[in-house]
Amino acid sequence: MSFICSFKRYVKAVLRLCVTLFLFAAITAQAQVLVRLAEKNVQVPAILPALTSVAQAGFVYEPVFNSRMYLVEAGVGHSETVILVHGLGENGYRDWRAVIPALAQRYHVLAMDLPGFGLSQKPSGRYSPTQYARVIQWLVSQTGQERVYLVGHSMGGAVSLRYAASFPETLHRVVLVSVAGVLQRAAFLSHSSALPIVSDGVPYINKLPTPIKDMAGEQLRDWGSRLLSYAERLPDPMAVLHASDTAWSGLLGDQPNANAALALVGEDFTQAFDQVAMPALIVWGDQDPIAPPRTGVLLEGQLPNAKRVVFNNTGHVPMSQADKFNTLLLDFLTAPIEPTQQDKRPLSSGDLTCHNLRDQHYTGVFNAIDLRGCNGAVLDTVQATSIYIADSDVELRNVKVLSQQVALTVNQSQVTMTNGELIGRKGIVVSASQLDLAGVTVRGSESAVSATEPSTVIFSVSNIHGPTINRAVHGVFELGSE
């Protein structure tokens, strides 16, 4: 009997040892990516001094572009992995220099210079979010983990969005910071044309009286907007490049920023949003001069489990506020998943009328909405049975219209709409106007979109459903003209 008891204790001890060794081996295999993949006998540039105590670096060979990629690894030994994806520019992984040490206290961290950037090789090929997402997929496969956390900034945010849509089963959560692209290129570029006019390159502009300077700025922005609209009607000079990888590499092979930027604005995310069901954190600066903050509103409205945080007095790089950003990031990565809260909206407030007023802001549930001569009006989180806009410059955010007749009528106006639904016998009737719609679904049983006078409609990641059309749309459309 004593022999049997001793044997059982021996077996249990062996099993405990095996389990311990297995867990240690699993964690080690997951974390030490560089130990397994780093190329030997290759001189490796020194890592940033601020990271020498927490991270190591080396070159790995990635199979998507068949190139040598500079990889930074920190937090070896932690069982969960966070992958950081940088934006355009030669900084590469350096964009995360203040983030990596904070993450490495709790997570295994991987950051890289994407192929074409920083210390990595500059291979031929199209530096698109789709291609870079394949690079991230390969890197995830090397961690030995089923799921990781993904954080992307600017172009890296677009890469992370594409990855989350293409490989959702491999992610716990995704963080999208100041995402570039996503909007149709005319809408994306118009953000720059709408920025305040500064004196750089325009001598003596700051010496002008403020009213004249403001008037000049308004005229220049209007001219820039019209020029962009006109350029969209011309034959696309990039069509040949988009159709030929050889032409693309031949013209852009030695210009990684141009390569990636052109591929970025040409990427269509219309079908991506429905695939991104994991928790998503969206971070933006309220004064971002590069990525329109409107894109953050779009993402929050389109991703089913998203939270948006805006940093005040901040530009394109929220990570520059290191303590604030790191606290937000770590809280999001570790917080328990909460069920999505449904908005409780009030009962209808009746009709809404705005005539010859400026900068009015409305929210709530209404019957008919009538806006005439209401420049700067904003409809935010609104439900209505119809909207009529004339002689106005109006912004619509998270608006839903369910109508028995025409959902949205626009006459001699400029309308920007982000997230929403326009449903009626006729979805949109437009006349001598400009519409910029992003993340909008238009449904019309008789007609989805029609024009009585020449008008321009920009669609970004939107959908149209009508008697003769039923598809996703991402482009510029000239209506009502011969």
Image (cartoon, rainbow, N blue to C red):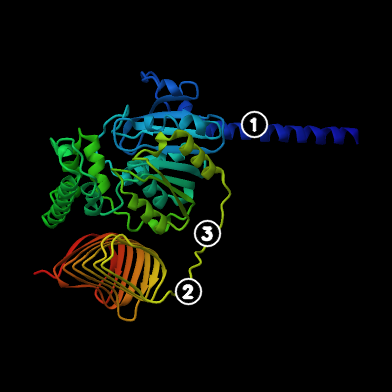
Relative to residue 235, is residue 350 depicted above or below? below
Report the mark closest to the observer, 3 or 2: 2
Closer-to-camera residue (45/178): 178
* Left or right side of 341 for 89: left
Instruction: Name the N-terminal-most of marks 1 and 3.
Output: 1
Cα–Cα gap, marks 1 and 2: 62 Å
On the image, numbered disc 1 is attached to which residue?
Answer: 21
Closer-to-camera residue (40/228): 228
| Residue 233 x, y percent position in the rendering | 13, 57
On the image, numbered disc 3 is attached to which residue?
Answer: 340
Q: Secondary structure at mark 1?
A: helix
> From the image, which quarter does the C terminus lie in?
bottom left
Relative to residue 71, is residue 133 depicted above or below? below
Q: Secondary structure at mark 3?
A: loop
Three-letter code for the amino acid on which mark 1 is drawn: Leu
Three-letter code for the amino acid on which mark 3 is drawn: Thr
| Residue 253 x, y percent position in the rendering | 20, 35
> From the image, which quarter does the N terminus lie in?
top right
On the image, numbered disc 2 is attached to which residue?
Answer: 347
Q: Residues within 10 Å of mark 1 (few under 14, many from 20)?
A: few
* Left or right side of 285 for 327: right
Residue 126 seen in the figure = no
